Image (cartoon, grey):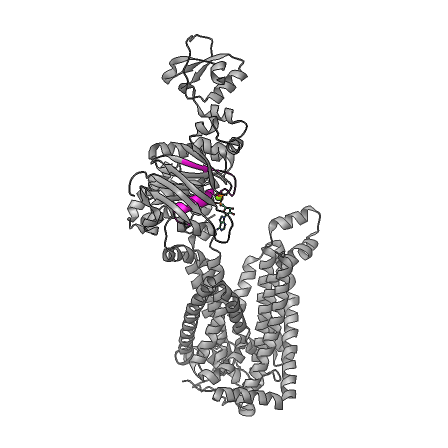
Amino acid sequence: MRTEAAELVFDEATKVYPGREGAAVHELSLTVPAGEICVLVGPSGGGKTTALKLVNRLIPLTSGYIRIDGKAIGDYNITELRRSIGYVIQQVGLFPHYTVEGNIGVVPRLYGESRSWIKARSAELLDLVGLDPSYAKRFPAQLSGGERQRVGLARALAANPPLMLMDEPFGAIDPIVRTRLQDEFLRLQGELRKTVVFVTHDIDEAIKIGDRIAILREGGKLAQYDTPMQILDHPVDEFVADFVGRDRALKALALQKLGDLKLGEGVRDGLPRLPAETSLRDALSFLLAERQEAAVVTGENGKPLGVVTREDLLR
Amino acid sequence: MIVSSLVIDAFRFIGDNGSLLLSETGQLAKLAFASLAISLAIALPVGLWLGHKHRGLFLALGASTLGRALPSIALIGLGIAVLGVGFWNVSVALVVLGVPPILTNAYLAVDGVDRDAVEAARGIGLTETQILTRVELPLGLPLILAGIRISAVFVVATATIAAVAGLGGTLGDVIVNQASYGEAGVFAAALCVSAVALGTAGLLGLMQAAAFRRMTPRT
Amino acid sequence: MNGVRFAGGGVVIPHFHKPSACLLHNGWFCADWLRQHWGDTLQPDLIQHIKLTLLAVGIGFAISFVLALIGLRFRLLDLPLGAFSDFLYTIPSLALFVLLIPLTGLTVTTIEVALVSYTLFVLYRNIVAGLRAVPADVLEAARGMGLTRTETFLRVELPLSAPAILAGLRVATVSTISIATVGALFIAYGLGQPIYDALQQPDIFRTELVAGGGLAILLALTADALLALVQRAVTPWTRAR
Ligand SMILES: Nc1ncnc2c1ncn2[C@@H]1O[C@H](COP(=O)(O)OP(=O)(O)O)[C@@H](O)[C@H]1O
Ligand SMILES: [Mg+2]
């Protein structure tokens, strides 16, 4: 499983906690292709955390299979399995007695990496998660919540795992910092292309982060597994429609960019200009606020690509 | 076996010398409790007040280390060398040993009370004294009682040693005088001392547990 | 030179070539006596006392550690184990020595057993509290990262409970040094000897009392300071704010 990214398959994975009626995760079947982010989302108690912990065997499966790169998790050595999966949790769980560098170096040290290797690796990872190299010698108590979560992420990435499990990693962080961390996480993923299972209860975060979204309902049953766009456009039932919210049309607008649209002719001066990366939602908001009917969409170096109208956006 | 026969002899000694042991035990208890009372009167207000002010951590911790480091026989000897032998003279030494655990725990108990609770009490207009007696004292009670218990154990144990240094009539003189009382007598006296110490500690332990129970909501 | 020395035993009046004025007036701190008896009395007693303490705290620590692991693994046993160590602590030292003599005789072992039983109280409580206070999220992270049980214990739980354990060791060491002086009432060993000798002189031999008691206090405070330094050195994260 020492590839850059691994394929993860849930195959009728079921967890029933002893002494509890009903399953926490019920016959969950889904495939996360290598290099993609799968977001598990659903109401509290929906079995998201349980599903995640089944993967690194923090919780044993009751029945069914989970396979990583085609091999059942039960066939891996449990310690090896866990060491090759990055694990990030909401409370972070940094080791208070290790410095940032010490925390990042925990698993590499167990693999027998040298001090200098760890030093270099930690500097590289700090840079990757957007922290100054001077943070290496700090203790967790000297970090803010957002900084701790970045270090948690760097620690999980230290051994270059092909699979990452993240349980509400930004759940305890204030909205402004959360947005920044989400953006940086997406930038990071653009470079690293890991397979990621990301748990959240926030549908907006799911839409923003996920390549695919798995919506779990109570009892750990999979309600829908699709791309964010599909889920917003075609929720399979009332539960999913409810969960994504009445404003799902607006959310769908937020997902598409002007550049994705078929643009009209008629570029002329006097029309406002919007870059192609602008989301449809922002474009619509702009046109309404500026009392304009249309705008010129611009590409690189401000080169006009075509015209977009209010009607185009509302279709 | 020798041991079991010794225990039997000890109980026989207790039966035969009941009045002697009773009066000596009473004397020991009197000495210990008087010293404990004085220690409480000194240490409790000081510890509570310092804790309330969050001042004097160094004093509180230093007192406990020093208190622990003082060898009790040497201290009693010193007291006798300076003040001479006598009930109150010996109790001075016992107070010196009894004060530190009470002081330290009272300090830590009050100092450690949730600052938000104190802030809230101040906010609704309680005076400093009211905050101390109605908020900090009840919340810190288990720890305060633990300090008193340690101090009581310490004082009872040391009161016995006082006899060694010359103060008669507190069981210690029986314990170190095997020539007169025999092995069984020594053993019996040791049992009596232990009984006083365990009884005191047990009583304070029960109070401590009760204080704890009152503070933790029933589930 | 082990031997029984109950109160009322022979009073040994020290022999001096030329008793100084200080000694004649039973002064508090007669330098000539101290100089003369450092080598034959005080130093050997001090060394005995150090040995006594090291052994008692060492054995006490080993026992408490094992008991703490048992108490943590088998929750039901924690209460009785705690109560038992509490109970041992409550027995007055003088009485405990007496109660032990029928079992272990008038030997240094008796002192050791008594001292060890006193250390259990502080050490057991502190080790259990320290190990139990390791945050749950830290343990989950360790498990999720693939640390084995042993690795988690050695690299995470043990270092994180070091402040509590060392605090317990400081208290236990200081108390042991102090309580060990009581043992000399029965068994001539350690710094209790000069103290007890002094008490047996008609007017209490002040210099010897101060020397014995002072050395015991100094030893205790030195040990406490040394352990405080160790504590500082091995727990740098506790001062990071
Ligand atoms: N260790 C456990 N023992 C028993 N039941 C559990 C345990 N952990 C979670 N559960 C139950 O399983 C269900 C799913 O929990 P969880 O996976 O934590 O949900 P989520 O992460 O989606 O909020 C809940 O009903 C929860 O009470
Ligand atoms: Mg959860």
Q: How far from the left and from the top, in percent, is residue A112?
A: 29, 51
Q: Would you say residue A53 sits in the magenta stretch?
A: yes
**Horizontal relation, residue C144 to residue A173: left or right:** left
**Horizontal relation, residue A272 to residue A32: left or right:** right
Q: How far from the left and from the top, in percent, is residue C154?
A: 38, 58
Q: In front here: A144 or C174?
A: A144
Q: How far from the left and from the top, in percent, is residue C142?
A: 40, 51
Image quadrant where one finds the C terminus of chain B: bottom right
Q: Residue at x 50, y 76 (%)?
A: C210
Q: Residue at x 48, y 73 (%)?
A: C117
Q: Quadrant of residue C105?
A: bottom left
Q: How far from the left and from the top, in percent, is residue B153?
A: 58, 72
Q: Residue at x 53, y 30 (%)?
A: A245
Residue span colored magenta: A38-58
Q: Is residue C18 above or below residue A78?
A: below
Q: Residue at x 47, y 74 (%)?
A: C115
**Horizontal relation, residue B42 to residue A194: left or right:** right
Q: Is residue A293 visible?
A: yes
Q: Is residue A151 visible?
A: no
Q: Is residue C131 above or below residue A98?
A: below
Count of marks placed on residues: 0
**Horizontal relation, residue C25 to residue A130: left or right:** right
Q: Would you say residue C143 sits in the magenta stretch?
A: no
Q: Is residue A85 above or below residue B188?
A: above
